[in-house]
Amino acid sequence: MNSLDDKKPSIFNFYFFVGLTLIIASMIEVILNDFLLSRLTLPLTLMTLIYWNVATPRNIGFFWTMLSGFILDIFLGYLLGIHVVIFLLTSYFSQRYFHRFRALFRLQQSLIVAIIVFIYQIYFILISNNFAISIIFELLILTIISSLFWPIIYGVLRYLRIKLTYGQ
Amino acid sequence: MFGGEHKQTDIAQSAIFTTGSMRASRFYPAILFSFLIMYGDYSFDLSSKIRIFSSYIFSPFTQIEYLVEDSFNSFESYFSSQKKLSEEIDMLRNQLRDLENQNLVLQNTKTSLNELEELFDLSKSFQERKIILGKITDFKKFPKEILTVEIRSNNVTKDMIAFNAFGLIGVIDELLNNSIKVIPLHNESIKIPAKNSRTLENKIIVGTGKPKTFLIEEFKKNGDIKKGDEILSSGLGGRFPEGFLLGKVTEIKENDQSNFLQITVENTFDFSFGSTILFTKP
């Protein structure tokens, strides 16, 4: 009767799994940044963070949010804390409105994520004082690509979460 | 059945009443902490130190690509006939590098020998006078041109004059332990008794402070002088030896408000040339 409860992993396992996915996402983002000939990045870490905040708001802690932010700051050459601030804000608002977000269709979610990514990229354009016509093009392209990536990230992380939680 | 009800309650609690881990009471300190870190990085450049440290830590991983490539190449070439050829090319390259180094050394030796030969030819004209050789160790251009020459003799006196392969180039400014400071003849403080080799007329030439350039002092307008006249040291006063070329007249300027001509004498002697300086008494 309690078979589902028995298969639940300990809170520490899940906590570390969330952290691991965030670190892997930030690593991929750093590697992609080297390959993409763009001044902006594909915000995989941000999207992973949104997913975990929406899916398991109680398990996503400050530590992993800040650590992944610091990793990006160090490897992408930003001032320490730039990514952390935006990640903390994203986490805060994602957790505040996760009920509404969960209720949306995947397409609507993609649109919301695209808006978040758009704001996120503008934040970096403002910080790096990188105003140019060409960057607007990059901004739009990366926002569209990010919204296309959202269902994939959502699907993969959901699959992994269910695997880890229920072993199915 | 009760377990199922319990699970439903648990899910409902988690889903509806949870506020997540990101409460405002935790969020504001975290934001403040981030700003503090940002300020720390801005003031003390923490991130570059962390970047250097992390690149040091991760260097084995970043080098893996090259290590694998090198290993693969050496493994592949070991079983191919190219190995011998590449080894031979490496050996020949090394030999070529050695030969180039030897060539450089020989060229330097040749230059030094030529310079010494010039100096010894020059020393023949000193007859029985004592000569002392020194090695140039330093040359300063500012605030004034000075050569520092290392010597191993204690017999150098301040009245000695300095020659290089070109000829007479300077006088001793300062005597130090095992070294001498030499200033050039074109220094503004130096006046040299000279004569025109064509007319044998005595005159005084003074340094201008510009390299290789002198002026003839107080040469009257009705005096006999032409461009190209050779000016030699006259030996008067005993400060400088007689008969050494000081330069050629290159410019004669006339001034209506003065009874004297302004005559420029130039030579081609490079003050800092070579590695050896010869000192002798005039």
Image (cartoon, rainbow, N blue to C red):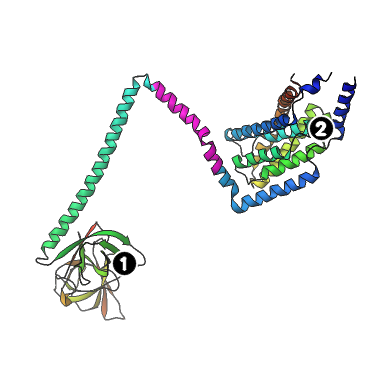
Q: Dividing the image into 4 quarters, which one contains the C terminus of chain B?
A: bottom left
Identify residue for label 2. A101
Q: Is residue A131 above or below residue B213?
A: above
Is the residue under label 2 in contact with that under label 1 (CB below 8 Å)?
A: no
* The residue stretch that appears in magenta: B52-76
Question: Residue B178 location, x and y as percent?
Answer: 25, 64
Q: Are marks 1 and 2 on the same chain?
A: no
Left or right: B8, with B100 as reference point: right
Question: Residue B117 location, x and y as percent?
Answer: 15, 55
- Identify the residue at horizontal 72%, vertical 37% (top origin): A117
Left or right: A149, with B139 as reference point: right
Q: Residues within 10 Å of mark 2 (few under 14, many from 20)?
A: some
Number of dots carrying numbers: 2
Q: Is residue A137 above or below residue B34?
A: above
Does residue B69 show up magenta in the picture? Answer: yes
Chain holding disc 1: B
Q: Which mark is residue B210?
A: 1
Q: Could you tell me the amino acid type at mark 2?
A: Phe
SS type, badge 2: helix
Question: Residue B11 location, x and y as percent?
Answer: 85, 28
Q: Could you tell me the amino acid type at mark 1?
A: Lys
